[in-house]
């Protein structure tokens, strides 16, 4: 097989792969629709679990509803994570959202990771 023919085959396989991935992405968007934020509010959460780096994540409990959020992403790196006492209370933003073509409603906690990590510095 000549070198030019081998390069052509590699390029064809590569473009087929790219178009397949793009098709899956667009099909997913077609199926779910657009992301629609329904509500945001600041709520008080208790730290009930600390999952240290490399990726710093927290388990949080909503003080009012007792709902548990597991593995909430804080930051990729947080050198001050050891200064966070268990069962401390914080205000974080809770976001309620849905996809326009689906009836299910979701809730997530958003944390400004860099600001939160710097607030833990002693």
Image: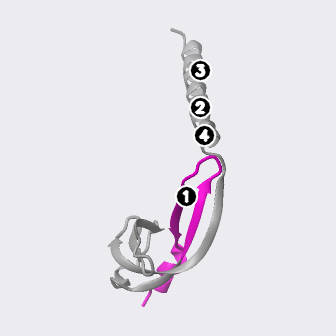
* Distance between the alpha carbons at the discs numbered 3 and 4: 28 Å
Nearer mark to the viewer, of 2 and 3: 2
SS state under label 3: helix
SS state under label 4: helix
The verdict on residue 63 being magenta is no
Which residue in the protein does label 4 denote? 31
In this rendered view, identify the residue nearer to me: 32 or 2: 32
Nearer mark to the viewer, of 2 and 1: 1
SS state under label 1: strand
The residue drawn where x is 34% and y is 73% is: 50
Nearer mark to the viewer, of 3 and 1: 1
Left or right of 112: which side holds 66? left
Instruction: Please identify the quarter of the rendering in which residue 71 is found.
Output: bottom left
Q: Which residues are magenta?
A: 93-122
Q: Residue 7 at what x, y percent from top left? A: 57, 19
In this rendered view, identify the residue nearer to me: 3 or 120: 120
Nearer mark to the viewer, of 2 and 4: 4
* Distance between the alpha carbons at the discs numbered 4 and 1: 16 Å
Report the colour scheme.
Answer: one colour
Q: Are marks 3 and 4 in contact (CB under 8 Å)?
A: no
Which residue in the protein does label 2 denote? 18
Residue 28 position (above or below residue 71) = above
Say whether disc 4 or disc 1 marks the residue closer to the N-terminus: 4
For the residue carrying disc 3, how many other residues have a C-alpha within 10 Å: few (<14), some (14-19), or many (20+)? few
């Amino acid at each position: 097989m000549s070198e030019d023919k081998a390069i052509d085959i590699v390029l064809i396989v590569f473009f087929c792969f790219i178009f397949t991935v793009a098709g899956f992405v667009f099909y997913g968007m077609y199926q779910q629709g657009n992301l629609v934020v329904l509500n945001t509010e600041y709520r008080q959460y208790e730290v009930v679990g600390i999952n240290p780096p490399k990726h710093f994540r927290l388990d949080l409990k909503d003080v009012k509803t007792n709902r548990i959020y597991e593995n909430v992403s804080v930051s990729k790196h947080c050198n001050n994570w050891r200064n966070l006492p268990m069962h401390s209370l914080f205000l974080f933003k809770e976001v309620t959202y849905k996809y326009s073509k689906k009836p299910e409603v979701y809730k997530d906690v958003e944390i400004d990771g860099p600001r939160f990590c710097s607030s833990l510095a002693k």
